[in-house]
Amino acid sequence: MRSSRLVGLAAVLLFLGGGIVGVGGALVFGPNTTAYDAPRSVSLPRDVSLDAAIDSLDRAGILASSRTFRLVAEATGWGAQIKSGHYRIASHSSNYEMLDKLRRGLQDPVRVRFLPGRRADALAGTMGRSLEPNANAFRSTLRDTGLARELGTTPDRLFGYM
């Protein structure tokens, strides 16, 4: 009689443990994005917090559940390791895949188009709208004599290196 109770208790505990592992695995490795055709882009600013990252992912229409994303981020400690940058998130990505990409800083390139023959100020404005540094930072880089000297050119010709 006692051994049958032990077997029954062990079976219940095993069943509950399996359920917990299954739910945990689904939270971490199951898809947590809304359904969309092409990967969606999100830009995270410098010194981004977990709250700001979740807000950005929500605004981009990426997260299906911000609560499970936060839960996994806090449980793993990866929420404090999120890097700034531009990321493309594929549909059906799991919390693990998204957090791994964000914490390792595996950024995707940003495409910037500008017409040939444009002046340096026009390029700086375009770059300032597409990337984190503002247009003034790009203008000052194009006029930087130290950078020009390092590249073996002059500030007037530095625009050709960009």
Image (cartoon, helix red, strand yellow):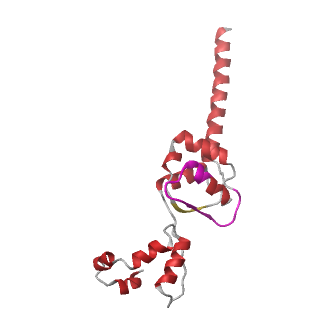
Farthest residue toward the bottom? 117
Which residue corresponds to the image point at 48% horizontal and 57% vertical from the top-left?
Answer: 105
Q: Is residue 9 above or below residue 119?
A: above
Which residue corresponds to the image point at 62% horizontal and 61% vertical from the top-left?
Answer: 90
> At which x and y percent is residue 57?
63, 56
Towards the viewer: 122 or 59 = 122
Towards the viewer: 24 or 57 = 57
Q: Quadrant of residue 145?
A: bottom left
On-image quarter of the C terminus: bottom left
Farthest residue toward the right? 35
On-image quarter of the N terminus: top right
> At which x and y percent is residue 136?
47, 73
> At which x and y percent is residue 78?
51, 46
Q: Quadrant of residue 35?
A: bottom right
Label tally: 0
Which residue corresponds to the image point at 40% horizontal and 85% vertical from the top-left?
Answer: 160
Q: Is residue 67 above or below residue 158?
A: above
Q: Is 35 one of the magenta-colored residues?
A: yes
Which residue corresponds to the image point at 48% horizontal and 87% vertical from the top-left?
Answer: 119
Q: Quadrant of residue 73?
A: top right
Q: Is 61 one of the magenta-colored residues?
A: no
> At which x and y percent is residue 92?
65, 56
For the magenta stretch, what is the residue range? 34-54
Towards the viewer: 96 or 102 = 102
